[in-house]
Amino acid sequence: MLVLFRILSIRYLTLRWERAILVILSIALGVATLVSTRVLNRVIEVISTDAATPLAGADLFVGNGEQSVDRDIAELIEREKIPGVKTVMPLLLDRVWLIDPDKPPVPLSLLGATFGNGTRDTPFPKRGETIREETLKATIVRTDIPEYNFLLNRPIAVSRGLIDARAAAGHPANEPISIRFGTRKISCLPAVIIDFDADSPAASLARNLVGMELGMAIDCFRAADAKADAAPPVDRVTRIDVYLEKKQNVEAIAERIRTVVGDRARVRTPQAQRKSTEEIVGGVQIGFTLGSIGAMIVGMFLVYNALSVSVAERRHDIGILRALGATRNQIAALFAAEAILLGGLGGAVGVPLGGGLAKWAIGQVKDELTSAVLSGDAPPTEVLPWMIALALGAGMITALFAALIPAWQAASDQPAEAVRRATGSGGNTLRRIHQGACLLLIGGGMGMILLRHLLPPRTGGYVGVVMTLVGLFLAMPYFVSALAWAMQPVFRAVLGVEARLAADNLVRAPGRTGLVIGALAAGVSLMYQTAGVGMSNEIPIRQWLTRVLQADAFVLWGDLATANNSMTPMEPALAGELRGLGNVEKVIGIRFIRPEYNETLVFMLALDAVAYKQAIESRVPVGGRNLSEFTNLSGQPAVVVSDNFALRHKVAVGDFIELPGPKGKVKLKILGTAEDYSWNRGTIFIDRATYAELFEDSWVDIYHVFFDKSKDDGATMTGVKNYAGDRGLIVQDKKFIDDYLLGVIDRLYTLAYVQQMVIAIVAALGVVTALLISVIQRQRELGLLRAVGATKIQVLRSVIAEAVLMGILGVILGLALGWPMEWYILKVVIYEESGFLFDALVPWRQTLGIGFFAIVVSALAGLLPALRAMQLNIPEAIAWE
């Protein structure tokens, strides 16, 4: 068998190396999209998990999402002495910034915890002492700095990675570190160095972690501000981690703790924590995965076409082998092994290509992805061993699956038929199998879509669509035949002789070209769908941003990527100081928080509701957002919810919702709804003074500053920037904010376009192989044309005309499929995922560009087969049977 493989397969692949490269490249592109998607999904999963539960090593978590909890809850749990509970650890987790003169701030992760097991603070290790912290799986080493140095600088713990980085920059270990939180600056001195184990729950924070005793951290960063209009909470923590003894009933202990905690906080297992975050990012991950599957499917049909060429070219050799005694199983195994070889080589090329593509993709949206992560770092975009195994396996299995039909055809031929290159006899059986597969996939997919509400979440909406599209893709030969037949009179009336010959060939051989045209149609439809969905999203979101972002200046701390979460707050006293600047009309403070509601994270905006309504309506008096109920938010426990919140959570005006608060559940009445696209799980608007009173949190994440328009805007902006600069704050204008937010949307859609460009390239490779098949199967016809006087240029025109017609048919079918896909994505997928309802707009400009691109790519792909057709030897071509 090995000898046969070497003689027939290796020799053929060596002689047809350019075709082997096409197959390997097509598989490599499909594998690359698969690898990049897996890497990207892993990064999103790690980031979302770290954002929801940083330092996630405990068996149970007690908390309220992004809202803090009272520290005394930990003491209540500890006093209960629940059997099986090993450690109760309250934690304060925040993002702070390392301040060095003449250098930009560096984000650091702050951990406020107790050094030891229990809820009470314990002192730092003694000078020269080492402590092993088993809960965090870390070794704490005391530095050689005397205690009297801590009189001027607060003692802190630093990770080994941070101290090494500072040493590399020329900073000695005994040099004080300046840490900033909001507008507060605190001078600290490393007292201990923490070495984390590789499997420590804090390993992701090891590069830039600073630690404090819990009480000191609360005093330094969460203590009341005397100038605040409502004091931030004093003795509250981010969450409480509970560690259990081995082999305990986690759910039973969780129920005991829930009894102790009551409704002051939620008790969750790690699995429940992950579920709430997976629901938010799951749709994005599935979208990327479907794109990679599409590329693999298109690549599979390209391999099928290529192996069909291989069978067509070697039927004479196959016949001789069969006549010499080779069995059908040996012939089938020969082509299967050839496909596996090509698939393995394609996978090997696709793995590094996919790693590079993933690295580029993460670079496009890194700031947005990491803005909610405490460490401020994205996980490395490494291709893990299991991803490499998956990629190689997917490449080989895809190629093997694509080789099944050609291998069956090769094994089914009778020796006499194969020797004289006659057509085999298995066509009717294959045709019936093909028709049955099309009906099964289309019918099954449509059924899953119609019954999606009875199936597990996303199963019908996504799997059903994939099945339907694959079925339609398989049925493309029939669509191509019908469309080509319908357009044939037009072709004959309009086209020249060469193009008419090409059109007749398409009508006569829809099976050969149908899948390739289907691949082109798939690429066109996906690009159209992405352009249409992007346009349908961008226009209403842009209009919404124009209405809601009317401030002249935006004051924040950190950067725009982190300004929309609760990690970079500022003191509320800044509002009064900003109002005191010349020509400032209004200052609106906004606090962003993500509380839990209905087992998911929703978005809450605590803002100065009355002032905000007045400011917006003065700038957008006609056609502005509905702010009529914002006036009534002041002074009562009430909210306005976004339209998608009301839809997703099935609530209406007059209903009550309950959110976790510091002393238990907070009951809030819904006064109205408003248009908002901030969060796919819904947005809640509440008056900031009411929020500060009910939730004991008066921090502000961003200030919207409105200028007196009768005065000089330039002078006012200069005054605001000078004020902010003195305090290390950032000021941006409206145009910058608009461009940034729309740029985030554009970058996200760029990732989808890249996946679809891969599909378009694979489809173009399919055009090459399909036309190669055409040239091989039409050798006698082309030879006769040359014999009766057709020139080489006319033959070249005929083959290129066929490529162009394939592109035209692919564009027509792709656009016909693309609009329903866009409608389905907008009206079903996005609507059910987020509650956002967008109109399906037609992207006319992008449609023209997509169509032109597809036809040009098809024409260029036809050059190689056309050149081969020109080089045919007339006597040999006429002798071809």
Image (spheres, rainbow, N blue to C red):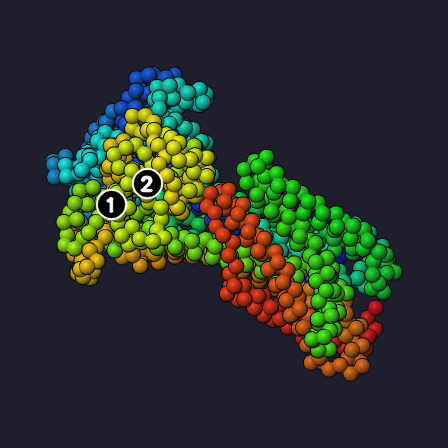
**Image: 696 above or below 479:** above
Query: Residue 33's x, y, as percent?
Result: 54, 53
Which quadrant holds residue 321?
Answer: bottom right
Drawn side of residue 543 relative to residue 456, left or right = left
Residue at point 61%, 63% (across, down): 811
Q: In the rendered image of this protein, does residue 666 appear above or below residue 451?
A: above
Going 25% across and 34% down the picture, which residue do you hit?
Answer: 635
- Please, which residue is most extreme toward the right here? 416
Q: CA distance from mark 2 to mark 1?
A: 13 Å
In which image quadrant can residue 241 be found?
top left
Q: Nearer the viewer, residue 236 or 339?
A: 236
Counting residues from the start of the chain, the first of labels 2 and 1 encountered is 1
Count of marks placed on residues: 2
Q: Which kind of residue does numbered mark 2 sit on?
A: Glu
For the residues labelled 2 and 1, say whether their Cβ atoms are less than 8 Å apart.
no
Q: Position of residue 540 (x, y in %)?
A: 42, 53
Crowd rating for badge 1 (residues with CA inside 10 Å; few <14, some 14–19, many 20+): some
Residue type for callout 1: Ala
Q: Is 414 displayed left or right of 533 in the figure?
A: right
Give x and y (percent) for residue 679.
40, 44
Disc number for residue 674? none
Residue under the point 41% across and 52% down: 541
Left or right of residue 844, residue 803 in this image: right
Within-10-Å neighbours for mark 2: few <14, some 14–19, many 20+:
some
Residue 506 visible to an observer of this rendering: yes
- In which quadrant is the C terminus drawn? bottom right
Reading the image, the residue beneath label 2 is 629
Residue 174 visible = no
Tag shown at residue 611? 1
As drawn, is 793 to the left or to the right of 556?
right
